[in-house]
Image: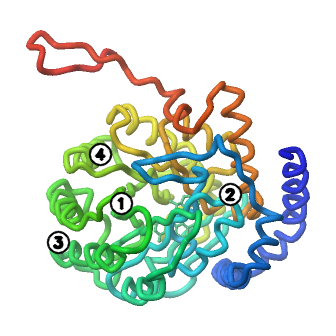
Amino acid sequence: MSFIVGLRNLFFRVLYRVIRPLIFLMDPEDAHYLFKRVGVFLGSNPLTKSLTSLLFNFEHKSLNTTVDGVEYRNPIGLSAGFDKDGELTSIYPSIGFGLAELGSFTGEVCPGNPGKRLFRMVKSKSILVWYGLNNQGAEKISSRLQGTNFGKLKVGINAAKSNITPEFDLQDSIDDYVKTMRLFKDIGDYYTINISCPNTQDGEPFVDKRNLDALLIAVNQNRVEGRPIYVKLAADMEIEEINTIVDCCVEHKIDGVVLTNLAKPAHNQEYVKEELPFHKGAMSGLPLQRISTDVIRHVYRRTRGELTIIGVGGVFSARDAYEKITSGASLLHMITTMIFDGPQNINEINRGLVKLLKEDGFNSIEEAVGSRNPLPKLKQTPNDTEVKEVA
Ligand SMILES: Cc1cc2nc3c(=O)[nH]c(=O)nc-3n(C[C@H](O)[C@H](O)[C@H](O)COP(=O)(O)O)c2cc1C
C-alpha cells in the first residue's frame, strides 16, 4: 500500500514540477488567493473532499500522537499565515494535515502593509514575507467559524496584536490578544500567542521580560480548560533573549513554544544574497531550516523537555521533519514546501516519517521526540536543594 502511495506522490511531484514555472509566472499573492479559492471549492462538498483524500491523504497509526492532552492523527501541521482568515479548514484533512494553525488573527481588522508584500526567492527556496498581519479581524472570523465541526483536524488559533499603529501601548496590546482569545474560546484545540511577527510597526515589544510577564498573566487568566497555550518566538534572537522568553514561559506554566517565526535577512547568512528582492520583510523556508532546528535543540535542553515544542522552518522532507522531532519537537508546522514542492508533499512527509520511526525502532512519534538530543545529566549540589547540569 505504502508503495502505491509512493508512486502516486511521485506522479504528483513530477506534475507539480511541470506546472510550477507557470504558477511562478503569477504574482505570489495572486497565486496564493487562487490556490485558496481552489481549496475552498474542494472543501465545499463531500465528493471533491473524498476525491482529494484519495489523491493526497495518508494514514498510519504510528503517526497518531497526543500532545498536552490533544489527540492528533499525525504531527504534520499547516503553519500560521497561509490561512489568515480561517477559510480552508474543511480541506486540510484530505491533503494529509493532522493540524492547522489559523491566523494570525488580531483583535481589530488589519489591512496589513501596503504595496507588494510577497516575493519568491527560488534559488534560496524561500518566500520573503512583508504581509504585516492582514486579516479580517477576530470578530468576523470567529463568528464565521463558531460551531464548525473540524472533524479529525486539530485547529490552532494564532493570536497576534493588531498592526495598525506605530506606538506600543502595553495594556492595549494585551487587550488585543485577550479579545481574540475570548472570541475563540469555543473554537479550536490550542492557542498560539504570536509575539514574533517581524513585519509590525511597533517591533517585538514582548521580548522584554516585564511586558511578557504582563501578557502571560492575562493570557493565563483567559485559559480555556483542556486547551494548551503556546508562544511563538522569533528566529533571530540572541541566546539570552531566547532564555528569557522560555524561562518566563516555564515560570507562567505556559504549555509550550512554537519555534520559529520568519528569519530577517539582516541576521541571516543562509540565502542567496543577490536574490533578495526587497529591503523589508522576513524569509521562510530553507534560510530558516538550520536556525530553527538549532533553537529547538537549545530550548529542549534548557527546559529539559518541560515545554512542548512545535517545530517550524524549512521542513521540505521527512528527514527534515524527523531531525526537528528527534531534536525535541512534538509537532511540526510548514508552508513553504507546499509552494515549492506541491501539496502531495504533506502526505509524503508523513509516509517518510513512518519509515524513519521504524528504522530507529520507535513505535510512536512520542518515543522519537528528543531522541537525538540527549539531555545533560543532573548532579546534586552540596546543599542538596539545587541541581546543576553536568557539562
Ligand atoms: C506567506 C506567509 C505568511 C505568514 N504569516 C504568518 C502569520 O500571520 N503569523 C505567524 O505566526 N507566522 C506567519 N508566517 C510564518 C510561518 O508560520 C512559519 O513560521 C514560517 O513560514 C516558517 O515555516 P516554513 O519554512 O515551512 O514556511 C508566515 C509565513 C509565510 C510564508
Q: Is residue 323 visible?
A: yes
Q: Residue tagged by mark 4?
A: 246
Residue farthest along the left direction in this orientation? 383
Q: Is residue 264 visible?
A: no
Query: Residue 303 in the image: x percent, y percent?
Result: 32, 36
Residue 91, numbered circle: none
Kind of residue sitting beneath label 4 = Val
Alpha carbons under labels 3 and 1: distance apart: 25 Å
Kind of residue sitting beneath label 2 = Lys
Q: Residue tagged by mark 3?
A: 170
Residue 227, numbered circle: 1
Q: Residue tagged by mark 2?
A: 125
Query: Residue 315 in the image: x percent, y percent?
Result: 63, 50
The answer to whether the beta carbon of the residue marked 2 is less than 8 Å from any atom of ligand 1 is no
Sort mark 2 into few (<14), some (14-19) or many (20+) by Cα contacts within 10 Å: many
Q: How is the image coloured?
A: rainbow
Disc 3, disc 1: CB below 8 Å?
A: no
